[in-house]
Structure formats: structure tokens, C-alpha cells
Amino acid sequence: MAAFFNTGLTQQQFLDEYWQKKPLLIRQAFTDFESPISPEELAGLACEDDIESRLIEERGPDSAWQVTNGPLSEQDFARLPETDWTMLVQDVDKHIPEFQALLDPFRFIPNWRRDDLMVSYAPQGGTVGPHTDGYDVFLLQAMGSRHWQVGGKAIHDAKIVEDLSLQILAEFDPEQEWDLQPGDMLYLPPHFAHHGVALNDCMTFSIGFRAPSRTDLLDGVINTLLEHELGKARYSDADLLVSADSSEIDEAAVQRLTKLLHDAIDESTPLLAQVLGKFVTETKQSLVSFAAETEDELSNVDALDQQFSQGQQLQRSVYHRFAWTKIADKTQLFMAGEVYELPVSSGGYLAMLTENQIIGEQDWQQLKQDPAVANLLCQLIAEGGWFWQ
């Protein structure tokens, strides 16, 4: 089985022993690592419209732990002290193509679970304070050194410092601590408290894996029930007993409600994959404008034949999320929060449409053998999921 970096673990052993369970420090996960982006280039991204960025100052001119949301300006950087601040830029893996290769070692974890690669830069003392995150994250040291402190267990009811723009822990009791050098990487499961402080000018790459909350999924289930006109059953109490107090909502009523809701979930079970697929492929609001740039006119199979014959290739948009599922008699492709139904016989092409980076003429010759798949590719091009190089 494939090795998990240089830990002596296989990828499956890492998932069994550490994933969502306990932290893991990996020394020299990337040997001789050099950052593909400089602090100056990162600052340039932070100044661009539509790119999500933040500036965090532990002792800002207006308040402690001051947060300035991007786009940042030259004036923002000009007023900064020499120490104790952090700049963060989201989705750098989408904005700079060179970062895509950095994600390859993590593809044993489903792509639809990955959120983004965030890059932070901080001079000495820079930190965002002790905090927890509700997602899995790999923290790769890309430049300089950072001191990390990590708690010993997941905290689900953490006490937060009041009246701050950041979710900083009021209490933090670390059990482990390390200094990370370029190429070192720390894995943290959800809700483990951690605190990183720059020991010098440093950059850290945060590769985050998101998961929908119960609220997110319940909202998706409700919308799906409404969309498909399911869940119309009403509360019923054919087993009603004479009530001693007409105002009481008794335990039996609550149990009936519980069963009603469970039955609604059971009724929508065939659609739950659709709920999940649509949710995890939704385009982040900060990326919508970039995703729209690749949209094209709706083509047909003949037009694609001509363009491929001229040596053109299709490239998958990094600003669109893809997923697919084959459950029972349903075959579905998801892109940007939309679902596309395919015949069961077309399932063999799903990976090519959602995971390939490039589709060339040889790939097209395979795809067009299935008319449903060929027509779907035309639609995905029109909606920006694939574009001509």
C-alpha cells in the first residue's frame, strides 16, 4: 500500500490511527522544500479584489486582535509594526496553478472533502492566538520557523474570549509543543486546540478538509424534500390517550414527533447522496467571479470534434468542485452545487469528467462513444467546469 510521507505508516494506517483521532508531527514531509510563492507575491494576492484575505494584528491601532479584511492596501502594510501580525490568503491553490501539485500527496482523501490551501505569512511573534478549528488540517511549514503548541484532546465546548473578532480560547492548556522548520508538517484533527507563533519571518501552508455540519445537512434534506414534494406527512396521534392536562406536551407527543422526523429522513434516503453531493460542490462565494470567467457558449458534439481535431485540449477548472456517485440505480455527477443525472451504463466515465486535469483528443474519442456523456461534457464546458486551453 502507498506510504504516508516518511512516517513508516501506509496511507490506510494513517487514516486508521490518526485521521480525526489525534495529532501527528511529520518531520521533513517535504524534503528540501522551497515555497512556490514569496511573501511579496502573497501580499500582492492579498491586495487583489475578489481574493479572500485577512490581516490580523495582536495589538492593532484600533483594538487588540484587530482583523482587517481584504482587499488589503499599501497603506495597510505601511502602518504595520515589525512584529506581531499575520497575513492570511485563502484558496491560493486555485489562484496559483503551481500549488496544485502540492496537493497530490493528499488525494487518498476524497477531493470533495478538501476545502482549500491557505497561506499565511507572519514576522516574528505573528500569531492568530490559541484556537480550535472544526475541520482537519495539515500545517506545512513553508518558510522560516514556527512554534506550535497543541492540546491533548478535542474540545467541543471551548470558552472563547468575549468581544473579539477572532475565536480565541479563554483557556489553553497545551500538552505537546514543537518548532517546525521548512518541510515539516503537523496534522491536526477537528477541535484540537492549537497555537502557532512565528519565531522569525515565516510562511505556513494550511491544507484544510471541511465537513458539513448537522445543520448544513438538515437544511439540505429539507430543501430536497420540498424540491421533490416529499415529507408531506403530518403529525398524527391515533394512539392518543385521555389527557389529564390539556396544555401538556407529553413524552408520547415528543416520541411521535421524533418518529415523524425519522420517517422523513428515511423517505429521502435515496436522495441523501444528492444532498451531500450538491452541498460539498457548492462554489464558495469568494470564488464565484473566478468560476464565471471560464463559462462558454453551449457547444455540440460536432463542435467538440472539430476543436479536438485541431489539437486543442480541455482543462478542468480549479474554481469548480466536482463529485460523483453510483448508488443502486442512480448515477449522478455534481458540479458547483448542481446535479446531473446519467444512465447507469455511463458510470465508467465519471472519474474522467471529474478528476482528470486534462481531456485530450484520445480521451474524447472514448467519451463520445456514450452520447449522454458527450452531451454532458458540452454542458459542463458551457457552465465553466471545463475550458479550452
Image (spheres, grey):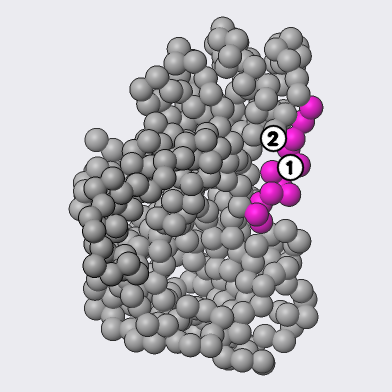
Under circle 1, the secondary element is: helix
222, 59: nearer the viewer: 222
Relative vertical location of residue 32 with respect to residue 61 in this rendering, above or below: above
Chain part drawn in magenta = 285-297
Residue 196 position within the rendered picture, expressed as x and y whole percent measured from the top left: 42, 76
Tag 2 secondary structure: loop
- Which residue is at a point 64% across and 17% down the rendered structure image? 375
- The tag on residue 384 is 2
First reached walking from the N terminus: tag 1 or tag 2: 1
Amino acid type, residue under disc 1 in the picture: Ala
**On the image, numbered disc 1 is attached to which residue?**
292
Q: Are marks 1 and 2 in contact (CB under 8 Å)?
A: yes
Q: What secondary structure characterizes most of the magenta part?
A: helix
Q: Find out whether residue 290 is within the magenta segment.
A: yes
Q: Which sits in the foreground, 10 or 286?
A: 286
Residue placed at 30% from the left, 49% from the top? Answer: 237
Residue 167 on the magenta segment: no
Mark 1 Cα-neighbour bin, 10 Å: few <14, some 14–19, many ≥20:
some
Instruction: For residue 220, say whether it is visible.
Output: yes
Spatial CA span between label 1 and label 2: 6 Å
